[in-house]
Image: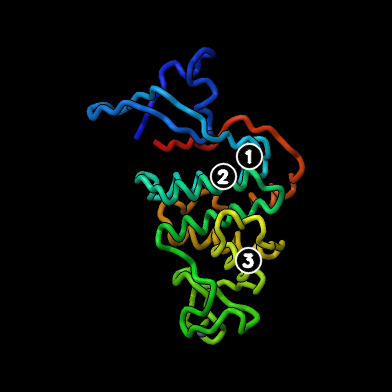
Amino acid sequence: MKVIAKGARGLKSRFYGSLEPLNYISIVFYFKEKRDLQLISQADIRNYFNRIKTDLEKYSLTSIIFEVILRSEYAEDPNPLLFNSVVQFLESLDRAAERYENHFFWLLLKFLQIHGFKPRFDSCIHCGRGHSEEVDFYFSINRGGLTCRNCKTSEATGIMLSHPTINYLLALENTSHLGISAVIDSKQAVKESARLLNRFMNYHIEGLAGLKSMDFLSHIRSSANTKNQKSNTGNGAQTEQDT
Ligand SMILES: [Zn+2]
């Protein structure tokens, strides 16, 4: 649905400041069936997420999330489950003092789960061998789960995952938004997770193939390099609406 706020750019507008990108807002609008653009009569801010807007690394990760959602084939339909997860992601990332990637991966795993592509990290999808029984497991991109060494021969799209990475992704998949910051990360786990989720989403989610921002790894690397360089990014991703 498309909406318009008349006179929103004026300094004296009642919408002043509330319709900026990345604001979480409630709106009141008048729905007329024959109209393509619906008219907003009121907009109230529920959260600014100011600590995301003023942190380059947080802002970059959030931009990728919004681009993935907007470019996926599911963007057109209302999805309260995904919307609530995005709000929880924004609230927890806004508060976070470290481990920003945890929040990013948590939301991507939620996105996959909501759309029926939840990856399986607990045991081999062929023989059921537990993930703690071997040093390394492969992850089958097309089957969406771990494959042990014995079963690997039948898999053409397997990529190797180390134990710390499997434990990291399992912990993120099983935690609520309140526990994201407490999940212990490592450079290796972040790197392998970025590579895995990038390939997995490109393979399964229509609309993401060829998306430049799907190159999570380079984003995360460059944002890691600019850590502690706080920068005020003025505009960008996407405005959330909930009514
Ligand atoms: Zn197996």
Residue 1 image position (x, y, % from top left): 34, 35
- Cβ–Cβ under 8 Å for marks 2 and 1: yes
Residue plotted at (69% across, 62% down): 185
Quarter of the view holding residue 121: bottom right
Residue 120 image position (x, y, % from top left): 50, 71
Residue plotted at (45% across, 46% down): 83
Query: Which numbered tag is attached to residue 168?
Result: 3
Q: Residues within 10 Å of mark 2 (few under 14, many from 20)?
A: many
Callout 3: SS: helix
Residue 128 image position (x, y, % from top left): 49, 83
Residue 123 image position (x, y, % from top left): 52, 78
Q: Earlier in the sequence, mark 2 or mark 1?
A: 1
Residue at the disc numbered 1: 52
Which of the pair 54/89 is nearer the observer?
89
Q: Is mark 3 within 8 Å of ligand 1?
A: no
Above or below, 51 relative to 109: above
Amino acid type, residue under disc 1 in the picture: Ile
Single out the residue that lies furthest toward the right.
Answer: 228
Above or below, 172 relative to 239: below
Above or below, 35 relative to 239: above
- Cβ–Cβ under 8 Å for marks 2 and 3: no
Query: Which numbered tag is attached to residue 90?
Result: 2
Residue plotted at (48% across, 33% down): 25
Callout 1: SS: helix
Amino acid type, residue under disc 3 in the picture: Tyr
